[in-house]
Amino acid sequence: MRYSQAFIHTLFEAPKEAETPSHIFLLRGSFVYPLAAGLYSLLPLGHRAVEKIKRIIREELDAIGGLEVTMPVVNPAELWKKTGRYFDIGEELIRFKDRRDREFVLAMTHEEVVTDMAKQFVRSYRDLPVMLYQIQTKIRDEARPRAGLLRVREFQMKDAYSFHHDFEDLDAYYPKIFNAYLRIFARCGLNSTPIEADSGIMGGSGSHEFMLESANGEDHFVVCPACGYSANTEKAVGIKPDRTPCGDAGVDPAMEKVPTPGVKTIADLMRFFGSSEEYFLKTVAYVADGNLVLAVVRADFNVSVTKLAGHLKAVHLDYAPEKTLFETGLNAGFLGPVGIDRVRIVCDTSITGSAPYIAGANEPDMHLKNVLPGRDFELRETADIAEVREGDRCSACGRADLQIRRGIELGHTFKLGTKYTARDSMDTTYLDDSGEPNRVVMGCYGIGVERLLASVIERWHDQAGMQFPVTIAPYHIIISQLGNQPEVVAMAQRLYAKLGSTREILYDDRSESAGVKLKDADLVGIPVRLVVSRKLEKTGDVEIKIRQTGEVRICPEKDLEATLDAIFKDLEPSIENLPYMEEKA
RNA sequence: CGGGGCGUAGCGCAGCCUGGUAGCGCACCUGCCUUGGGAGCAGGGGGCCGGAGGUUCAAAUCCUCUCGCCCCGACCA
């Protein structure tokens, strides 16, 4: 492709809304064009890169028996009502009516549609297992799109669904998809970290998120440097250290009411009482599916909304409005577990009866000192509902302290089980070899395609621009023709014609100055740059520059093809030595 | 949804406080010239100053309301 015809319009300065590297370079490099918040057009360069990613995904999924389909984005609301998601999902799901007043939704994933398909066609155990996937537009009215392509409202997602005889069959299949994911990301040039993820209210027997460690990620996960345990902070469990003892051992003074006018926050209380965080109980009020719940943690911890929701099996969980508290006779800022009998109280496992705490007295401007769990209030319901912290000891091996990392979620694999095939959902069964009906068991697996492109740029860039891996670069080689002397032009065109039969070439034929051409070549990140200039033409040489390493070599034109073959072989990302999951035969 | 910031040419910005002919750099077009790191000279096109209402002889500028965009947080099948 000649640059002059390629619809590439790079920007010298980035639009001011762009802050993360991928966002800046995608805009500057003429890969994407914003239409509205979280809505982007893919320009030719961006489109080509995305198509390459999709090709890699298809190759890997086809290799494990996946069958590609395409399902509609517009779904009848009825289907979503059947599974309950119509009611469970908030404003993120776009709902509308057609001209005949029928209700529809714009699909954010396709569990309903694909299960409907399976219900129709899967009759016999002979039809299972089967894995169907698609690469299709997904629509989500995100509350806050951000960072260019990292979080958007309309995007292409590879979503895959597998159907199985039973959980054993799903368990046997799961490593295949897990390993395919590792290969997909590796082939795109990314070192992904699979972490244990929260499987939400569905319970389920397993879920992994594939993370790219990145300062611009929005997710947090823990890793144990000793045993390799890694999990989303929403799910991760650390060992909660005991408190340092204080007061006289064996003496448990009686509970005592202390006036604390206007002292509401833990920070204020620490100043007031002169004690550290771990001697306070932090009580937070939530409304879980319409019911008031108090969550109590030791104050050096924070409540994990995900863990609490999981424990309560709640679909909707939110902070309780102050009005609700007031109506129940409770006071924000002075909440505590003592003397409450009508409201459900969940205590974190960090709370033990071994020593007293300071807690809210449930009346305005009052706190209680020397509150002993078990004595002054009942520890009726205890669960791990606290967020893991950096430095908590690993609960898997007990040998090292957990580290918290930031990352971008590249993909998610999930043993769904029977949430969608259950009788009260899509009621999907098959007949086994003895003619008995059995429930189909499912898995689902997603990858955000444009996010993957943005992630590659987050990982592979420098000051000057993007540094694409050869596997997903929009072009393999850019020929920068410096000068317009007839010999130089002839040489550039000769290379363009010759190399074009085996590789994708972007031939910069513009009459721009040398500086502009070289800067643009760096910006758009084509992995190999060939420079043709007057000086080089005289000696019959071509300059080769490798974008990722910056390595430059001068190569005689006659050796060019062999040299490039070796270079490209070298640049191919490896899929060896990944943290593969063992596959059963 | 809460907090903060910003809307003036495709992009980056000045002008606004103190009302009076809408500007600069880059990009774009024409010509000459030039080709190893965002050249040079000359000429040129491009604006409902986000929108609506108000104050005023007069509004990019002052007032009110609205819409949009970005960042932080909340939320995220």
Image (tube, coloured by chain):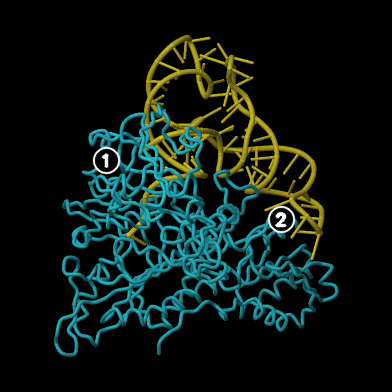
Chain colours: A cyan, B yellow
Label 2 lies in what chain? A
Residue A489 picture location, percent across and down: 74, 68
Label 2: few (<14), some (14–19) or many (≥20) C-alpha neighbours in 10 Å? few
Q: What residue type is labelled 1?
A: Gly
Label 1 lies in what chain? A
Write down the quadrant of residue A436 in the picture: bottom left
Name the side, left or right, on which A210 lies relative to A433. right
Residue A140 picture location, percent across and down: 36, 54
Q: Going 69% across and 67% down the picture, which residue do you hit?
A: A547
Q: Nearer the viewer, mark 2 or mark 1?
A: 1
Alpha carbon separation for disc pair 2 and 1: 74 Å
Return the disc, 2 or 1, that comes first in the chain's sequence.
Answer: 1
- Residue at the spot of label 2: A516
Residue A428 picture location, percent across and down: 19, 74
Name the side, left or right, on which A389 lies relative to A142. right
* Residue A287 position (above or below residue A117): above
Do badges 2 and 1 share one subunit?
yes
Q: Going 22% across and 59% down the picture, which residue do you hit?
A: A84
